[in-house]
Image: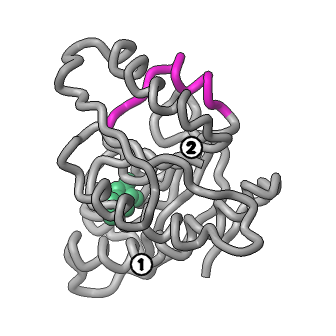
């Protein structure tokens, strides 16, 4: 499988560390739109091949950016793509090429709070709980069949940062669990805790 990221890559590390022993998948590539993404060095330290295609060279040309992304992907030939903090919106064409084989993790209990600033929005709304969702990627942003969810209570006095830290800890449990099941061909959702 290949992992696409834009940032520090803590989910990527957990995914890679999970793929040992009888796990049906192995990592073949970590790919970023940001050559300076912290996750790239972490992936290399874990012995996984990396590549970076800066989206900045493709301003206003998403198909061009995706064609460039597809070069290292075609060389690595993954069966599954996991988006893990990949902060670029993909075109419907690219999504269609990988549909049924591409997963994403989103830090909210979808269908609530698609897009950005999910933790602040959940606190602002007075929600009792937040969480994270792993879903199949479809052409609609943060949509697609849900493969797993983990719930995280919102505590009195929570800030977006404190809540995000607790949600991230749950992301680290949920994403590897969903990937293992998905790679074995099982799409039944996993509900944590
Ligand atoms: C995670 O919260 C993920 O849900 C969101 O971006 C963050 C990525 O964190 N889409 P990391 O790079 O995996 O540490």
Q: Give the labeled residue for mark 2.
A: 81
Left or right: 100 in relation to 83: right
Please name the residue shown 52% across and 22% down the image. Answer: 94
Please name the residue shown 36% across and 80% down the image. Answer: 166
SS of the residue under disc 1: helix
The reply to whether residue 121 is visible in this rendering is: no
Q: Nearer the viewer, residue 186 or 35?
A: 35
Q: Give the labeled residue for mark 1.
A: 169
Circle 1 crowding by C-alpha within 10 Å: few under 14, some 14–19, many from 20: few
SS of the residue under disc 2: strand
For the C terminus, the image quarter is bottom right
Q: Which of marks 1 and 2 is nearer the N terminus?
A: 2
Residue 25 quadrant: bottom right
Please provide the residue range marked out in magenta: 88-99
- Residue 70: x percent and y percent? 47, 25
Please name the residue shown 38% across and 60% down the image. Answer: 43
Ligand 1 rendered quadrant: bottom left
- In the picture shown, does residue 187 fall above or below 150? above
């Amino acid at each position: 499988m290949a992992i696409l990221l834009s940032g520090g890559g803590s989910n990527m590390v957990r995914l890679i560390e999970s793929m040992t022993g009888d796990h049906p998948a192995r990592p073949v590539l970590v790919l970023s739109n940001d050559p300076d993404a912290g996750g790239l060095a972490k992936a290399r330290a874990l012995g996984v091949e990396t590549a970076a295609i800066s989206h900045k060279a493709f301003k206003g040309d998403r198909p061009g950016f995706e064609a460039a992304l597809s070069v290292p992907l075609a060389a690595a030939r993954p069966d599954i793509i996991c988006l893990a903090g990949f902060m670029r919106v993909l075109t419907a064409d690219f999504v269609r090429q990988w549909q049924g084989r591409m997963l994403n993790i989103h830090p909210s209990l979808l269908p609530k709070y698609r897009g950005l600033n999910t933790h602040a929005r959940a606190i602002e709304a007075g929600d009792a709980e937040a969480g994270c969702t792993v879903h199949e990627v479809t052409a609609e942003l943060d949509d697609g069949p849900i493969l797993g969810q983990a719930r995280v209570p919102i505590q009195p006095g929570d800030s977006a940062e404190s809540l995000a830290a607790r949600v991230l800890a749950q992301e680290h449990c949920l994403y590897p669990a969903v990937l293992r099941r998905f790679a074995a061909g099982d799409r039944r959702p996993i509900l944590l805790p």
